Amino acid sequence: MPTGTIKMNKPPPTPMVQPPGKSEKYRGVKHTIMVMSGKGGVGKSTIAVNLAVTLAKQGFKVGLLDADINGPDDPKMLGVDKEKVYATEKGEILPLETKYGVKVISMAFLLPSEETAVIWRGALRHKAVQQFLEDVVWEDMDYVILDMPPGTGDEALTVSQLVPDADGIVVVVTPQDVALLDAKKAMNFASQLKLPVLGIVENMSGFVCPHCGETIDIFKRGGGEKSAKENNVTFLGRIPLVTEVVEKADEGIPAVEINDTLKQIFDGITSELNESLNKRKSKEAS
Ligand SMILES: Nc1ncnc2c1ncn2[C@@H]1O[C@H](COP(=O)(O)OP(=O)(O)OP(=O)(O)O)[C@@H](O)[C@H]1O
Ligand SMILES: [Mg+2]
């Protein structure tokens, strides 16, 4: 292959037709929340999945839109990575219903195997996410959580611009000082796109040794709270490093299903998030 050319896979089998105007099917969605970060690997998917499951447990109708076309991890974390999604004769896509009460859509459902890399140019990726927003039957969801692609580059930008009337973003950071810079990047991104920041979550915050019970601050502590203060946004909560999170995610079980401490933490995060949403609503109304 000559240098500079990019190998392109075939697009997914469903037709990529853009309906005119904003999607009818998305109109019933009450809240759209994007989970993003200034860089990759900080726990966006973990938090998006557990946030969605927590809200569903509280009785809300919740959709999870895996907007990470390159690394679609959510189906695996929910134990549905071997499933496929179906389209109706009208070309509507039905999101996959999981046993945790969350409906999910992801590129993973459209790939022939887990190991298949998506090597598409921007325009095609953009169409895939657009289709997730426009052709998926989200019905009257209370929340659609978007698990965003890593970082604040092109990919995240394109996705953000596609989302109709998002309520705002939840920024995930790790606790060390350099994370402050990453948080700042995410904040700048949000302000340039005029997206409200609903709050910051500090992930991988301290590790409780299962042997001696001592807490070890592997990535230091407090960076998320500090950035929330500095940027005058809500601090939503702190999630510790827990080995069960990794083990259970690999088994397709969200951590909040089996770990009471994490369940409580995510309950706290969702109540702070709802407060932040309400504050925003009353600010808009005034
Ligand atoms: N609090 C935690 N405790 C232990 N492991 C965690 C925690 N949060 C995330 N992880 C693990 O860290 C890894 C990265 O997390 P995750 O995939 O959620 O990050 P991400 O920000 O979505 O990554 P990417 O940018 O690649 O999409 C995963 O293996 C996940 O299980
Ligand atoms: Mg991810």
Image (cartoon, grey):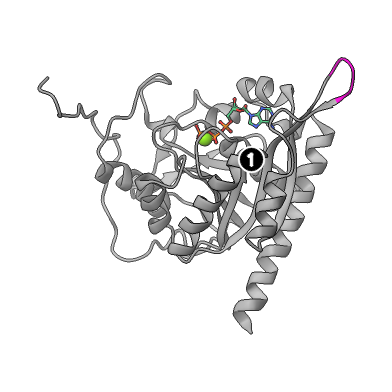
Q: Quadrant of residue 283?
A: bottom right
Q: From the viewer's perspective, is 59 left or right of 165? A: right
For disc 1, the marked residue is 47
| Residue ranking furthest to the front | 177
Above/below status of 217 relative to 61: above
Q: Quadrant of the N terminus?
A: top left
Q: Where residue 50 sits: x, y (%)?
A: 67, 39
Q: Is residue 139 above or below residue 250?
A: below
Instruction: Point out the image quarter for the C terminus.
Output: bottom right
Provide the secondary structure element on which disc 1 rests: helix
Dot 1 alpha-carbon crowd within 10 angstroms: few under 14, some 14 to 19, many 20 or more: many
* Residue at the extreme top of the image, as rendered: 211
Q: Is mark 1 within 8 Å of ligand 1?
A: yes
Q: Which residues are magenta?
A: 210-214
Q: Main secondary structure of the magenta part?
A: loop
Q: Nearer the viewer, residue 34 or 151?
A: 151
